[in-house]
Image (cartoon, rainbow, N blue to C red):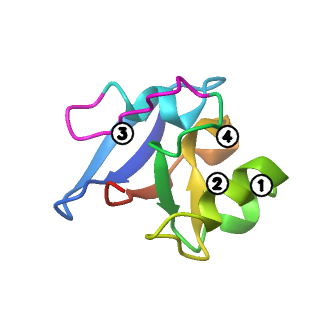
């Protein structure tokens, strides 16, 4: 089992089973406290915005230009912002820690 550590908008940390081979967004949208993911992972709405724990940032691929553009337009943008629909959950990401960003 690969774990995904999720901090919800209330600041509570949860450990959930991550689905290897799926996008992180797909796990988060199924949680009661997760993300809306309105566009279904098409990188067009930013409703799956998360903050990646700084210890994990270097293990992720760099965001593509369309993701970067969406993120930088958000009022809650931070240097560790990512769209969870653009992060494939792999066995190497076991223990990945993300915080769900505030709603825009």
Check if mark 4's residue and mark 1's residue have beta carbons within 8 Å: yes
N-terminal of the pair, mark 4 or mark 1, is 1
Q: CA–CA distance between discs 3 and 2?
A: 16 Å
Q: Residue at x 64, y 54 (%)?
A: 70
**Which residue, given by chain and number where applicable, does mark 3 sit on?**
35
**Which residue, given by chain and number where applicable, does mark 1 sit on?**
63
Q: CA–CA distance between discs 1 and 3?
A: 19 Å
SS at badge 2: helix
N-terminal of the pair, mark 2 or mark 1, is 1
**Which residue, given by chain and number where applicable, does mark 2 sit on?**
70
N-terminal of the pair, mark 1 or mark 3, is 3
Question: Which dot, 2 or 4, sits closer to the camera?
Answer: 2
Q: CA–CA distance between discs 3 and 4?
A: 14 Å
Left or right of 61 in this view: 43: left
Question: Which dot, 2 or 1, sits closer to the camera?
Answer: 2
SS at badge 3: loop
Q: Is residue 64 visible?
A: no
Q: Quadrant of the C terminus?
A: bottom left
Q: CA–CA distance between discs 4 and 1?
A: 8 Å
């Amino acid at each position: 089992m690969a774990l995904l550590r999720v901090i919800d908008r209330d600041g509570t940390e949860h450990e959930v089973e991550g689905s290897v081979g799926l996008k992180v967004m797909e796990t988060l949208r199924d949680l009661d406290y997760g993300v809306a993911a309105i566009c279904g992972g098409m990188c067009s709405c930013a409703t799956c915005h998360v903050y990646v724990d700084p210890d994990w940032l270097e293990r992720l691929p760099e965001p593509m230009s369309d993701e970067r553009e969406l993120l930088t337009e958000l009022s809650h943008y931070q240097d560790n912002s990512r769209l969870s629909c653009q992060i494939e959950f792999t066995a190497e990401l076991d223990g990945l820690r993300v915080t769900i960003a505030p709603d825009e």
